[in-house]
Amino acid sequence: MPAADVVIHLNQAPRPGSHNGVRLREDAVFTDYKGEESKGVRKRAEQALRNLQDVLTKVLEPQETVLYLARCQAPASAFEQFAFGWYIYKVTGTVLVFTNRRLLDLRIKPKGLFGQDFEWTLCLRSIRWGDLVDAKVSGWLSPTLALRYRTGKKESYWKLDRGNAKKIKVLLAALLSGAAAEATPAQGVVSLCPTCFAVLTPRVYQCGQCGQVFKDEKTMVRRSLLIPGGGYFYTGHTFLGVGDFFVEAYLLLLLLSVGLALLTLPSAPTQDVTAADFLVSGVFIAGILAVEKWGTIHHCRRFIRDFIPTKG
């Protein structure tokens, strides 16, 4: 694995340091892609270190040091980006922390009206450099970081700042060289417990080491099916839950109205509308409701699989 003093910029000698208790390399964390000191880079890095200091001081391993931090959006499919609309930026916010040993993905949520400040959501993923087959930065207006794991899975982090994109290219050139010999049994990305930082087993919603319990798929599906907006409320996305509640409630009222109309239809003196017409309408509304429920479950499954700790 790359040493803590791995050379990142030829014009900068390694300068180990510490910020808020977090081990870092000042020559890399606070410089731009040319290795030059930058007030803007320093300001953003210091903000990220301040907000993430609690988790970083605990998750970093011995001889592991932070080389850079970059804020961007976590992987999301084209369908998810279309379905969520502008809200996708809220639910996929992340800070990528580059260290000499791995890439840490810390999910965040905005604080305040304009979302410039943020806090950690307790969702954490880790990618060892040796478990990457390839990593490339591409794009100009909205650069992305495309990763390909040894498992064959591919993911892309998107909406990188152009300055960050250029810096990440430099980091990858220094960190991926010779990293193949350090592959782990995981062969790809893993989720970590936010309490003890042990590796979590996919779709097993309790940490095998410390017992931390996470919200689970069965409960999410049940609430999504039985309660309008219930899946979103369960995963902590109140805004989406409220919107989903009104949409599903409206569809249920329409379905109820069609059912009542069918019951009273025989007593109507004139029947310009037949029972078949009501049945077709009812089936159509039920179909829309089913699609709505499916969409809710699909979206909430994504949140659940990122491991959401239960309170307490």
Image (cartoon, rainbow, N blue to C red):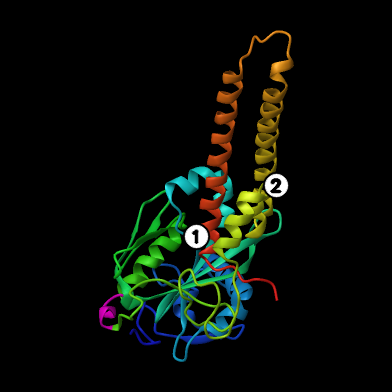
Expressed as whole percent of the image width and height from the top left, the position of residue 245 reads: 68, 44
Q: Secondary structure at mark 1?
A: strand
Is residue 179 magenta-colored? yes
Residue at position x 58%, y 25% in the image: 279
| Residue nearest the viewer, comparing 240 with 105 | 240
Relative to 226, is 134 above or below? below
Residue behind mark 1:
72
Q: Look at the numbered discs 1 and 2 and tell me whether their residues touch, using CB distance below 8 Å.
A: no
Relative placement, left or right, of 154 versus 191 is left
Quadrant assignment, res 262 = top right
> Quick one: label 1 or label 2, which is nearer the N terminus?
1
Amino acid under label 2? Val
Q: Is 56 covered by the magenta stretch? A: no
Part of the protein shown in magenta? 175-181
- Above or below for 74 versus 128: above
Q: Is residue 15 left or right of residue 274?
A: left
Q: CA distance from mark 1 to mark 2?
A: 27 Å
Three-letter residue code for mark 1: Cys
Q: Position of residue 184 (x, y in %)?
A: 33, 81
User: The C terminus appears in which quarter of the rendering?
Assistant: bottom right
Mark 2: give few (<14), some (14-19) or many (20+) Cα within 10 Å.
some
Q: Nearer the viewer, mark 1 or mark 2?
A: 2
Of the pair 174 and 250, the residue shown nearer to us: 250
For the point 44% across and 60% down, which residue is it? 163
Where residue 188 sits: x, y (%)?
A: 36, 72
User: Which residue occupies the foreground of this view, 307 or 118?
Assistant: 307
Q: From the viewer's perspective, is residue 280 above or below residue 288? A: above
Category of crowding for the residue at label 1, using alpha-carbon neighbours closer than 10 angstroms: few (below 14), some (14–19), many (at least 20): many
Q: Which mark is residue 242?
A: 2
